[in-house]
Amino acid sequence: GAGVSQTPSNKVTEKGKYVELRCDPISGHTALYWYRQSLGQGPEFLIYFQGTGAADDSGLPNDRFFAVRPEGSVSTLKIQRTERGDSAVYLCASSPLPGLHTGELFFGEGSRLTVL
Amino acid sequence: RKEVEQDPGPFNVPEGATVAFNCTYSNSASQSFFWYRQDCRKEPKLLMSVYSSGNEDGRFTAQLNRASQYISLLIRDSKLSDSATYLCVVSHFGNEKLTFGTGTRLTIIP
């Protein structure tokens, strides 16, 4: 399909483990975002990439969270020493333009992370 | 205080009725406003932008009140397919991120 693709769709891990979540944006979209959504809450901003660089990482909760986008396309969100509070749906979104001219982010279906 | 606040609901509304949601935002520097729709266990999708002059898209009308820092969404002649969570979203000039509210859950009852 031509939409944003996220893998895995579900990930169950144990407290203290390391996880990687992958996002494949829509081809040609230069802007890429990571959000996370807890039950009953709206999406919470984590990080924004413009091309290969992280233009805004102010939403990353602590240094256990890190994201990369080495070639300006696929991005990986990495979480070290997972905690139960990290359990959430991690949403990736892409946008064709730098700058939210239309306000439209195209979201993937998310990766549901459960930390036991 | 959250930057974007919404009544989480749930709103249970009979089919064919009119329903309205409000959303307030705290940052007066907010420049752009949107409503997103999120179906259960699905990703959010843009429903409509909110312009200063107000705008309408079929049965949906969005309005902005900058003085009182709130936006609204009105749904007329509600359909069963309108059942979803409606997310209020703002962004600031020069800041390339969208800030989402917690969402208002709407259920249309046959």
Image (cartoon, rainbow, N blue to C red):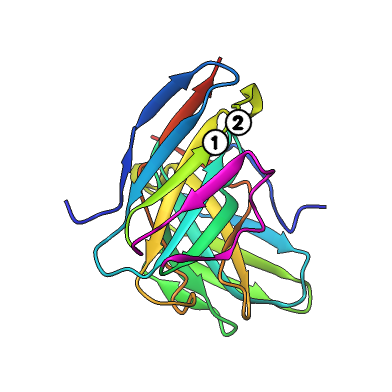
For the image, the number of numbered tags is 2
- For the question of whether residue A110 can be seen, the reply is no
| Residue at mark 2 to residue at mark 1: CA–CA distance | 9 Å
In terms of depth relative to the viewer, which is nearer, A100 or A54?
A: A54
For mark 2, what is the residue? A86
> Mark 2 falls within which chain?
A
- Outermost residue to the left: A1
Question: Which numbered mark, 2 or 1, is in the foreground of this view?
Answer: 1
Quarter containing the C terminus of chain B: top left
Residue drawn at 42 percent across, 42 percent down? B83
Which residue extends farthest right?
Answer: B1
Tags 2 and 1 in contact by the CB under 8 Å rule? yes
The chain under label 1 reads A
Q: Amino acid at mark 1?
A: Ile
What span is in magenta?
A52-72
Q: For label 1, count other residues whose C-alpha is less than 10 Å away and answer few (under 14), some (14-19) or many (20+).
A: many
Residue B1 appears at what percent x and percent y? 83, 52
Residue at 47% x, 31% y is A19
In front: A33, or B70?
Answer: A33
At mark 1, the secondary structure is: strand
The spot of residue B13 in percent (x, y) is: 51, 41
Question: On screen, A49 above or below B1?
Answer: below
Q: Earlier in the sequence, mark 2 or mark 1?
A: 1
Question: What amino acid type is highlighted by mark number 2?
Answer: Asp
Query: Residue A54 lies in magenta, yes or no?
Result: yes
Q: Residue at 39% across / 76% down in the picture?
A: A97
Q: Around disc 2, counting alpha carbons within 10 Å, would you say few (fewer than 14), some (14 to 19), or many (20 or more)?
A: some
Does residue A62 belong to the magenta stretch? yes
